[in-house]
Amino acid sequence: MSRSAHPAGPRHADVVPEGHYTAPPTDLNALDSKVWAQTVTRTPDGVVSVGGIDVKKLAEEFGTPAYFMDETDFRARARAWRTAFGEDADVFYAGKAFLSRAVVRWLHAEGLNLDVCSGGELTTALSAGMPADRIAFHGNNKSTEEITRAISSGVGRIVLDSFQEIVRVAHIAESLGKRQRVQIRVTVGVEAHTHEFIATAHEDQKFGIGLADGQAAEAVRRALALDGLELIGIHSHIGSQIFDMAGFEVAARRVVKLLAEIRDEHGVELPEIDLGGGLGIAYTSEDDPSEPHEIAKALHEIVTRECESAKLRTPRISVEPGRAIVGPTAFTLYEVGTIKLLDGLRTYVSVDGGMSDNIRTALYDAEYSVALVSRVSEAEPMLVRVVGKHCESGDIVVRDAFLPADLAPGDLIAVPATGAYCRSMASNYNHALRPPVVAVRDGEARVIVRRETEEDLLHLDVG
Ligand code: LLP
């Protein structure tokens, strides 16, 4: 690739984004329930509301940009997963998607468990009263301090990710006079159809221990031999934002095969398998995710069938959905600042946030939808690119979207399905202040994570 400067065409590398976007929707004012949280609707005066409060009031009280989370929807989705999987399975919400103390309390109340992957997430979970035995601790490079804290606080399971960690966790558990329940995370060699950065079960990557070359069997051998460990099962997570159940099917089959090999070699039937998270959600009307009951039914059937043919007792299944629970429950509210019409090229709509509150578009080419929410409009659809206010041309929130042609500075627009991996991956780039998360329910709104202030920035900067 040439890195020397040359006269630019109108578009970078002169790439015309034909075919990247679809035709405009028939009704720009409509809100597709696939991508918007459950209680989102338009009030008779045309303003969008959530949890019974309209977005103009929310913007006045909490400012923009801000994430608004539909608590009713969050709880309903958590409950749907819990109910779908039933009493003989466990649902661990993946805290990396979004974690706060309020969320921990909702999960606890709805009977879910929690997957954490850092000391910070562990502290948040414990400080909001999640019982330690309902917490799973993950990560491919947990520190000695994190492992010590996890074991001392009594976490229900640690998911072991490497040979070194098997010994490390065993050693720390023994030195604390404990026997730690653990699972071993294996990479099953499945190619999940998702972005490379969020696919995790092909062999060439940093997570887990490979199944194919006998490494996983060796890890089991070592774990079973250590007094500090109680090996309760095998873990597999194949990736994220996946729609096709075929990958889970292959993963389940390979994990059950390993369970049978363990029984044959060691005479033990491990009682649990965890099939990870990764179920996709609708970011645009084109996406068609499965419902929790369909997923639960499919996974139960696969595991039961495979165990029957291997003559194994069916293990207790657990899953770790993050995005599928929290993703659809929130939207990000922005105020339009400037609109730039580049004749014959593109229209740029700049909002008061950007890649600091949603890095997913820049990082994964993620697609989002957007709507004008502070009023209705009968104007013609206009193809736009919604961009942020950061000093970077990759600062794109929605690559291609239709908004009404009479859009003007001061209008409020909202991007749905930003509950997962937006606030949790937010940054202070350009010293942006990370937006608040406001939970809305039954006509009441309350801040669950407050907006950062410039004082917060100065507190961290010790001069
Ligand atoms: N379990 C394990 C072991 C995981 O690594 C993950 C996600 C999950 C469960 C939850 O996956 P979910 O159901 O939320 O897809 N930042 C990326 C996603 C990274 C996912 C990392 N691990 C994104 O914004 O798409």
Image (cartoon, rainbow, N blue to C red):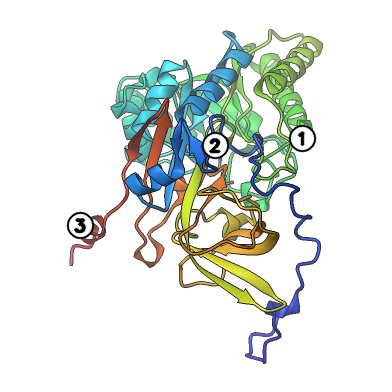
Q: What crowding class fits label 3: few (fewer than 14 Cα within 10 Å), some (14-19), or many (20 or more)?
A: few
Q: In 3D space, how far apart are the residues under numbered discs 1 and 2 (Cα atoms)?
A: 39 Å
Residue 94 falls left or right of residue 244: left
Give the residue at mark 2. 44
Q: Earlier in the sequence, mark 1 or mark 2?
A: 2
Image location (x, y in percent) of residue 74: 50, 28
Q: Is residue 352 above or below residue 446?
A: below
Task: Provide residue 403's location: percent of width, then percent of height.
Answer: 63, 57
Tags 1 and 3 in contact by the CB under 8 Å rule? no
Dot 2 crowding, Cα within 10 Å, few <14, some 14–19, many 20+: few
Numbered mark located on residue 244 in the image: 1
User: What kind of residue is marked 3?
Assistant: His
Q: Secondary structure at mark 2?
A: loop
Q: In this view of the protein, which residue sits in the foreground, 216 or 23? A: 23
Splitting the image into 4 quarters, where does residue 3 fall? bottom right
Lower sequence index among marks 1 and 3: 1
Q: Residue at x 22, y 61 (%)?
A: 458
Q: Which residue lies under the disc numbered 3?
A: 459
The mark closer to the camera, 1 or 2, is 2
In front of the other: 186 or 6: 6
Taking the spot 56% from the left edge, 65% from the top edge, the residue there is 349
Amino acid at pointer 1: Asp
Q: Is residue 270 visible?
A: no
Is the CB of the residue bearing disc 2 within 8 angstroms of ligand 1? no
Q: Please tell me how crowded label 1 is: few (under 14), some (14-19), or many (20+) other residues with Cα within 10 Å.
A: some
Where ligand 1 lies, by image quadrant? Answer: top right
Q: What is the secondary structure assignment of the residue under circle 1?
A: loop
Residue 460 appears in which quarter of the rendering? Answer: bottom left
N-term-proximal mark, 2 vs 3:
2
